[in-house]
Amino acid sequence: MTSPDVTNRETMRDALYTLLSTGLVGSGKWVQGMYAYQPDAEEIDGKSPLMWVSSGPTARVKRTINLRTKTSYTFLVQSAVRLDKTKTPAWVEDRLDKIEKELMDILLDDDNRSTATWQNMDVEESTPGYTVIGGNEYRIEIFPVIVEAYDG
């Protein structure tokens, strides 16, 4: 009995990171730092707003009809805006809202929902919150993004 050569989760995460960093980071865009992993305080170095893509749960289902393996990868796309005395709470919320809009424009674009890397993409309900990185408080929002690939 042979084992199927299943897709590597890192490959999927890197492809999602590339898609998002191309659309969200650069001149005239909202995000100052984008990472394919959760960065530490030294890497962030005061940047804000920032985003990162980290791995979440993976589910693999072997289909008996066509002997293919369907893999669902959940990635946690996180946006973060630093809270400091120079920014009002309204400014921080406005930045999160602008980032959410740009993120959804990319993720829900029909050309991105099915690519050479994955066959489907969905976005689940986001979770807002707060976190501390390197002694700085950030307002965050976590977007579970599910991509599916078929192997075998």
Image (cartoon, grey):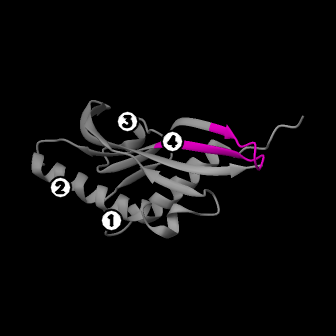
Q: Secondary structure at mark 3?
A: helix
Quick one: which residue is furthest to the right in this view?
1
Using the image, tell me which numbered label, if any, was put on residue 94.
Answer: 2
Q: Would residue 98 be found to the left or right of residue 87 on screen?
A: right
Q: CA distance from mark 1 to mark 3?
A: 22 Å
Residue of label 3: 41
Q: Amino acid at mark 3?
A: Ala
Residue 125 in magenta stretch: no
Q: Residue at x 64, y 63 (%)?
A: 116
Q: Secondary structure at mark 1?
A: loop
Residue of label 1: 29
Which dot, 4 or 3, sits closer to the camera? 4
Q: Residue at x 34, y 45 (%)?
A: 125
Could you tell me residue 7's position as x and y percent?
Answer: 69, 46
Q: Amino acid at mark 2?
A: Asp
Q: Which residues are magenta?
A: 60-75
Q: Secondary structure at mark 2?
A: helix
Please rate how many residues cluster around mark 1, counting C-alpha atoms within 10 Å: few if below 14, some from 14 to 19, many from 20. Answer: few
Mark earlier in primary sequence (1, 4) = 1
Q: Amino acid at mark 1?
A: Lys
Could you tell me residue 26's position as x and y percent?
Answer: 39, 65
Residue of label 4: 74
